[in-house]
Image (cartoon, rainbow, N blue to C red):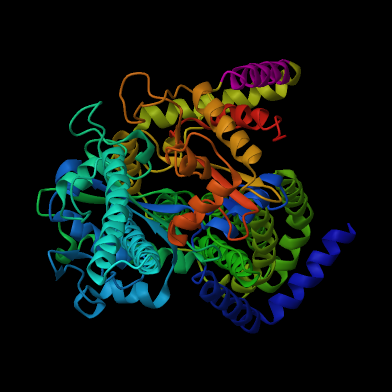
Amino acid sequence: MRGAAAFARLVRFVARRPIPVLAGVAVLAVLAAVFALRLQPSASTDTLVNRSSESFKATEQFKKQFGDDAVVVLVKGDLQRTLLTSDLATLIRLEGCLSGNIPAKSIVQKGKVLAAGLDRMPSECGALAKTKPAKVVFGPGTFTNTAVERINQGLGQATSQERAKADQLAAAARQAAAAKGYSKARQDQLAASARKLVAAQFLDQAMRLALRYGLTSAPAINNTEFVSQLWFDPSKGVNVPKARFAFLAPSSNAALVQVRLKPGLSDKQRRNAIGLIENATKEKFFRMQNGQRYIVSGVPVVADALASSVQHAVVVLLIAVLIVMAATLALVFKARLRMLPLALALAAAALAFGVVALVGGSLTMASVAALPVLIGLAVDYAIQFQARFEEGRAAGLAPVDAAPTAAAAGGPTIASAGIATGVGFLVLLLSPVPMVRGFGVVLVLGIVFAFGCALTAGFAALSRFGDRPARPIRKRPADVPPLFPRARERLGRLASASVATAVERPRRVLAVGLLLAALGWAADTQTKVISDVRQLVPQNLQALKDVNQLEKATGVSGELDVTVHAKDLTDPSVVRWMTSFEQRVLAAHGYKAGDTCSQTKNPPEVCPALSLPDLFTSSGQQAITQQSIKSLLSAVPAYFSQGVISPDHTVANMAFGIRLMPLDRQKKVIDDIRSKLNRRPA
């Protein structure tokens, strides 16, 4: 009774000042709607994983060190045409654009500079150079060009060293000959012989290296023999790429450019970067001449597309809810101001989402799903209060008196129902998934605002405008039969019989209800749980189609990273353990040396990607020593090594490509990899 009196006093105050109350609620709702419109859609991992979890913390540490998830540009088409034609130079220019750098001037073909200056490249390249969203870009073009530069640089340094050595030996030979009293001609002859000996030794070493690496001419990006020897494995076929380059050339019909974004980008910055990358690949400037085409995919692209679809879903859901609710109220709710409940529900929804925006929240799939639930609850509360108001008006009370009476009669019951519903949604706060917790918070806020709007703005509108007579119901002409008379008659009889049965035999009705509930719970345990990410997003989403094409071409659609911390990663025992660990993981999940991840028969679940051990296993060295490790790391350009090892050699990354699979199977793969981490380096 105290609650009823409190509700009556509040509504009596509202009923005497309807216009100021309506104006105040309207202003708050409009301001909240303005804030709500600023909500940014988000499908990032922090909406799915608890920030306090070990997995989330480890992922964030990895991103800080090696960069965020990669945007993958799939170059779909004959790999030989991509790498052994002028299209390779086009690919180098594209990679330079995506990295935000002016292409290197050392991209030379027979003395002609192939790389265009940034001022001649598309505007997207300028925007990427200005914002620099990429931490590192890996691609076949940059890799080939860097290999050419390093080999030629090494040859130049070796030549300079051999010349200095020849000069020293020639000088020593001349000095020795002079000490013996030989003539000037004899001294020159011995000095020349010393030079020839050094040259012969250098030539012998160069020939051995050339035979070892298949070099028959000076390396250059237009040297098809060199590029073919670098990329393709003739033992597997003329157009089959080497297995160790699967992270860049996974099959004979695909090349990959991986743009690893910088950590810490906002959703807006990430979205802009993805848009620039997508637009750049559509530019005529980067068009391939042999029919290849670009497909931009990867985890950030799918997440961005999902976020955009969430934003679109809000508009679609809001329009659908408005139409359905308006039609239902018009047809069913026979009362004055029949559209008032819908207006109050919209105000409550605006206030709830406005608060979410005010505290820095974002739109997720769950918060969008909360919108129709919230509007339905708000309409229900408003209808119940309005029905009590109409009963008071029918009893002869004036609007100002009918309002507090209705609040006292329905307030406690409706408040109890709202509290019970809110408590039920508060249980969602126990969920480990932030998105689910956000769903519960939005609904609880919505319930509070819906009840408050109905008590204030609802009764203010009814008090001010509730004395207007309702529209007279036009009587149906006698010669016009009612619609579906038999169906309406049968429904009426069925309803009357059901009510009568429930009143006369309550125990039986309750028993039947409990039995049906038990059967429902039993059937629910057999419900199939869908954990495949592809089933959780709209099937017509272009990003989903693209990621399916990426997996078909490469055999993988994502990356699983294992971070290794050590005092010194150049310790041979650590490298041997990492190599052994990588081999054990690959073998346990179906990968065999020399396999391609894109094979259609018995494809492996996990495939090798760019990792620190791969630098040593592909170097051709038989014995790994600390000196050889340091020498190799110093020889690898920092541009590439930063993707696998930290500058201080204390943190390294072992990456594995993983197929897109149901989450339960993916969890088993991850758990198995974690179990193999129990074997620590000696």
Residue at 38% from the left image edge and 24% from the top image edge = 603
Using the image, determine if residue 89 lies above or below residue 204.
below
Pinpoint residue 235: horizontal percent, then vertical percent.
25, 26
Question: Is 630 colored magenta in this rendering?
Answer: no
Confirm whether residue 407 shows in the render: yes
- Where on the picture, by quarter, is residue 618? top left
Q: Position of residue 364 (x, y in %)?
A: 53, 54
Dominant secondary structure of the residues highlighted in magenta in the image: helix
State which quarter of the image contains the C terminus: top right
Quarter-of-image position of residue 239: top left
Q: Specify whether residue 523 is painted magenta.
A: yes
- Between residue 226 and residue 515, name the one nearer to us: 226
Vertical relation: 56 (above or below) 110: above
- Of residue 13 and residue 133, the one placed in the foreground of this image is 133
Q: Residue at x 31, y 26 (%)?
A: 599
Q: Residue furthest bottom?
A: 20
**Image coords of residue 228 (percent x, y):** 20, 42
- The stretch in magenta equals 508-526
